[in-house]
Amino acid sequence: MSAKGEQSREKILTATKGLVMRKGFAGTSVDDILKATGLSKGSFFHHFKSKGDLANQLIRWHSAQDLKMFRTFMAQAEAAHDDPMDQLLQFLTAFETYLSDPDSPPRGCLYALYTYEDDHFEHDVKGHVAEVLQTWTAMYIRKFQEVIDRRQPVRPVTAKQLSEMFVSVIEGGLILQRAYGSPGLTARQSEQFREYLNLLFPDGRAVT
Amino acid sequence: MSAKGEQSREKILTATKGLVMRKGFAGTSVDDILKATGLSKGSFFHHFKSKGDLANQLIRWHSAQDLKMFRTFMAQAEAAHDDPMDQLLQFLTAFETYLSDPDSPPRGCLYALYTYEDDHFEHDVKGHVAEVLQTWTAMYIRKFQEVIDRRQPVRPVTAKQLSEMFVSVIEGGLILQRAYGSPGLTARQSEQFREYLNLLFPDGRAVT
DNA sequence: GTCCGTTCATACCGTTTGGTCTGTTTCAGA
DNA sequence: TCTGAAACAGACCAAACGGTATGAACGGAC
């Protein structure tokens, strides 16, 4: 694929992501995308063999970027601290900074959107969404397990429970944030989750 | 409106809710609804003057039922206990039981779905969604404030923070539950939130 | 320059969409 | 029993939909 072609493909994916975030996937027509990109129908169907194919490629393209970002955050946190709890806390604050970034309009989660429209998507698209969400939580599970291995939680809790709770709190925060139009809401949820962690694993500094 | 007419209207609303939960609103056609209800186009447009009107009436119809249920849960909890913390814990367990009910297929939140498709809806529909969500959290805020007034939390926290966190955790849980297809996930999030409360307000009666 | 595949443009197609129109049935109240 | 509004059915419509067919520009390889 030439540079020009790849550029058009990316333009379509970017525009689609923006439109879908506001109107849903079924609510976004191919013509909407063409209007947003300035491209033609011939070009669109050259890059994507159907609208369903676009749904497929969009979620894969998005999740690749998405996971990469999370992994970068985590790598930076791991480079900066030895103690897994400190790593986790730095990761969370980095994530909160990202969430509070007053950039692109209404934030939201594409995976959440897909799950609320799942009847339109092929089986492997739904599978991919579940898979990415699993990968996302698995990243946290690993880290929480390291914390638990090193420190006794005040109340019995599993790494999986904590991970799923964090992901839930973020996903739910994004919904409230959209509904209310208050940009900082999700980040505040993350802060609140950190409070929970602080109670669960007291004496903040590592003892190793 | 006659009994027969009201019956048809409810049939349409019920069927639409089910369809919309699986396909989104834009992804659900009027013909889909007609097929599901067995009614005719003439009948549909007699009860709803447009598809947008249906969106409007659906969310209002749903939120009325929804809030009524929550208020019942809360009233029962308030009747059973004097201490606000005990009331809250009973409310949460009642809610968890409801969430775990292995009944109607894929659970989800209609408000969440609307916020992810909000460009299609009129201003007052979006306003209503925000309003209902506010009412929902306000119910918790009142109760959490009573708890805080009576008991010093281990770490400084506001009733609003706790309320928004609970709503977030539930909304997010529903998304993961749908994505993974694991029915008990949301209820487990609520349990985890109770753990947080138990840590925050130590000498409270734990419901383990 | 010529060739050939990629990239893009446009006219067009069949189907589905939300919505209208006309007419029929139902049924409570006078 | 008659009447009129409410409830419903189904044919019909224009627009929008996803998708195709055809062919013109473009750009690197030879």
Image: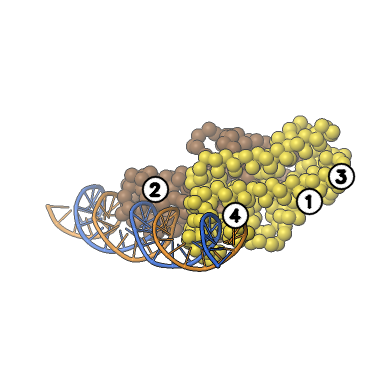
Chain colours: A brown, B yellow, C orange, D blue
Instruction: Determine which residue is flagged by label 2.
Output: A32
**Which chain does tag 4 point to?**
B
Q: Nearer the viewer, mark 2 or mark 4?
A: 4
Instruction: Determine which residue is flagged by label 1.
Output: B93
Q: Amino acid at mark 1?
A: Thr
Residue B18 picture quarter:
bottom right
Assign the N terminus of chain B to one quadrant of the image.
bottom right
- From the viewer's side, name the closer residue of A10 and B122: B122
Q: Amino acid at mark 3?
A: His
Which numbered disc, 3 or 1, marks the residue that appears first in the sequence? 3
Q: Nearer the viewer, mark 3 or mark 4?
A: 4
Q: Residue at x 64, y 61 (%)?
A: B105
Asked if B176 appears above or below A74 in the picture, the reply is below
Instruction: Determine which residue is flagged by label 3.
Output: B81
Q: Is A66 positioned to the left or the right of B168 in the image? A: left
* Residues marked 2 and 4, same chain: no
Q: Which mark is residue B1?
A: 4
Q: Residue at x 65, y 39 (%)?
A: B134
Q: Amino acid at mark 4?
A: Met
Whole-Å distance between the Cαs marked 2 and 1?
46 Å
Which numbered disc, 4 or 1, marks the residue that appears first in the sequence? 4
